Amino acid sequence: MNKLKKINQYLLENHPITWHSKFLQLLVAGIFGWIISFISGYLLFGLSELKNEDIRDFYADSNFVSFHVIYCLIIICIWAIYYYKNNAIKSFYPLSKLYFVKLFTQLFIAFSFLVSAYYPFTYGTINRVKNELKIDETEAKIAKLNLGMAFVLNNKSMYHIDNKKEIAKLKLSSIYYNDISNIWEGENSYMYYPHKLKDTYSGFDLIYGDFGDLHDSLSTQIDNYKYLFFKTESKYESKDSCESNLFVTDFVQLPNSDKLHVFDFQNLNATWLDYQSLYTQMSTNEMITNKVLRWSKNHQFDSIQLAINDFIDVCLEYKIDLRLDPRMILKYLKLKDFHHIESITGQYENKYNNRIDADDFSYPEDYSVLMKYSNNDVPVSIEDSSAFVTAIERQDIYFYKKDQIRQLLDNYEMSHFNRFDSGFISMLFVGFFLAFLFVLFEFANIVSFLITIPIGGVLMILVALGLIFINLSGNYNFENYDHHTREKNSIVFVFCIISIIVVTTIYGVLSKKFNKKVLNVLVNMTYIISPFFVNLIFGMNFILSGHYVNSKCGVEYVNGYSYITNPFWILLFALFGLFSFFPLIKKYKALED
C-alpha cells in the first residue's frame, strides 16, 4: 500500500497528466481484462463448441460478452469518480502546452485495451482449437472422413455422370431428354449452336440445325435416358460487341455407353471436405478418388466397411451426432451394384436412441424388412431385395450431422491458416469515442452542452432538408449524373455548413466581443465536428476528383483519393482534426475570466 502511495505521489509531482487521467490504473485494468479474456476463450471453447460454434462469433455467442460489458462499466464508473475529482481546467491550474493531446492519447490507449477483449478471447479459442486439432493428426482424420463419406451416400449428385473422370477431362456439358415432358433438360444456361433454327427448352436454350438428325446420331443412351454431351466456348457476338454468349462448338458421343450409368461410384472425381493444406490437398484427393474407384469396381466390401468404420470413429471422437450402420449400407450397395444409387442419410437432430423403433418410420411397412436384416450378417434375400431398397431410400433413419463436421473443420482451417487482426481497428474506434467523450466533459459546461443537443438536432434537420432540396430541385440529365453532380453539390453544401460553424467558433474564441453563451454552444459543436472535419475535406476531394474512364466495353469510375475508404486513414484524420482543435480550448477557457 505504501508503494502505491509513493507511486501516486511521484506521478502527481512529476507526471500530473498521467496522475489525473489514471492512465496506469486503466491500463492495468485493460491488461488484466485481456488476460482473463484469453483464459476464458481457451477454457470455454470445449468439444461441444468445436463442432457447433464459429470461433469468429464465439465471443458474441458466449456469456463472456456480458461479463466483459459489466466489467468495463464497473471499471469506467470507478475511474470516472476519481477522474472528475480533480480537474486542472476548472480549478484554474496552469496547463502544459500539449495537455489535451497527452490526456486524450493516454485515455485512447487505455480505453482501447479495456474494450478490446474480443481479440484475446478469440485468440484463446484459436489456441484451444490448435491444441485439440493438431495439423498432422487432423489431416489424417480429414482423409478418413473424405474416404468414408464416399460410402455413406449422403449426396446423390456426387455420383452423377458429369463427374466422371474421363468426361471431366474433356470439360463437357450435358442435357438429357425427359420422356415424360418430351423436352430436353439440363443446366440453367443459354447456349448457342451456330445455326438459325431455335428451340426453347425448360431452363435451357440451345440453337442448332437439324434437330432430328442431331437427336438420332449424337445422343448417348445411358440408363434409359438420352444424353447430349457437348463442348462449349464463350465468344463475343461481333467484333465490336461487348456482349458474349456461350456457343456449342462440338457434340461428343461417349464410347461404351452401355457400361456407363447416370449415378455410379465410377463417376466420382473429387473429395468434398477440401480442408487440407494446399501442399497435400491435390495428392490426397487423387489418392482417395483412386481408392473409391478401385474398391467399388472390384467390390472390395471389407475395405469399404473399414472406411465407413473409420468415418464413424472420427465422428464419435468429436461426438458428432450420427447413426450409421455399415452393414445396412453394404447390403444396399450390393443390391445396387454401386450404381443407380440414391441418398440414404439425412442431417437431422439426433432425437432417436441407438435403437430403431417402429415410430421412427414414415412407412410402417418398411420397419419389418429393415429389422429383419439390421442385426445380423444374413444377405438380403431375392424376394426382399426390392422392399429393402425401397425402405432404405425412402426412410431417413440413418443420418450424420454433416454441418457439425463442416463447422469443426472450418474452425480447424481458421485457427491454423487465417488471421483475426483485420477488425482490430473497430475497437480503436470505440476507444477513440470513449476518450473523445471524457475529454469533452473535461472542459465543457454541462448546461451549455445540454443546450447544444437540441440546437445541434435542429441544425441536422435543416441540413437534411437542404440535401433533399439539392437532390430534388435540379434537372439532372444522364450525363450530369454520370459526373456525380448530386453527390458533389451535397458534399460541398455539408462542407460549407460545417466550415461556417468552425470559422465562426474560431472568430468567437479570438474575439473579445462575442456572446459567451453562443460561443459555449459553438465550441461544443466544433469539438464534436472536429474529428469529421479533416475526413470531410478528403471526402470532398474524393468525390470532386472522381472521373469516368471510357473503355471499349463500358466506363469505370476512378477516385483520386481512394484511401479515404481505409478505416486506418479515417481514424488518423479524425485524430488530426481533434488535435487541431485542442489549442482553441485554452484560449476559450481564458475568456471566462
Image: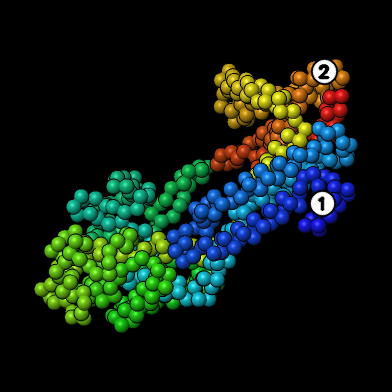
Q: Are marks 1 and 2 in contact (CB under 8 Å)?
A: no
Q: Quadrant of residue 336?
A: bottom left
- Judge from the rendering whether residue 429 lies leftward or rightward of residue 366; answer left or right: right
Q: Is residue 404 above or below residue 584?
A: below
Is residue 463 among the parts visible in the rendering? no
Q: Which residue is mark 2?
A: 514
In what quadrant of the picture does the C terminus appear? top right
Marking on residue 8 = 1
- Picture coordinates of residue 485, whole percent (x, y): 63, 26
- Say what secondary structure mark 2 lies in: loop
Which comes before the other along the chain, label 1 or label 2? 1
Q: Look at label 1 and name its amino acid.
A: Asn
Mark closer to the observer (1, 2): 1
Q: Is residue 446 above or below residue 53?
A: above
User: Which residue shows up at 76% across the image and 47% down it?
Assistant: 22
What is the CA distance from the residue labelled 1 to the residue labelled 2? 42 Å
- Judge from the rendering whether residue 580 lies leftward or rightward of residue 409; answer left or right: right
In what quadrant of the picture does the N terminus appear? bottom right
User: Which residue shows up at 56% across the image and 64% down it?
Assistant: 42
Q: Look at label 2 and name its amino acid.
A: Phe
User: Which residue shows up at 88% across the image and 48% down it?
Assistant: 13
- Say what secondary structure mark 1 lies in: helix
Of residues 484 and 581, the one nearer the viewer is 581
User: Which residue shows up at 66% across the image and 21% down it?
Assistant: 455
Q: Quadrant of residue 514?
A: top right
Q: Residue furthest front?
A: 2
- Judge from the rendering whether residue 170 lies leftward or rightward of residue 340; answer left or right: right
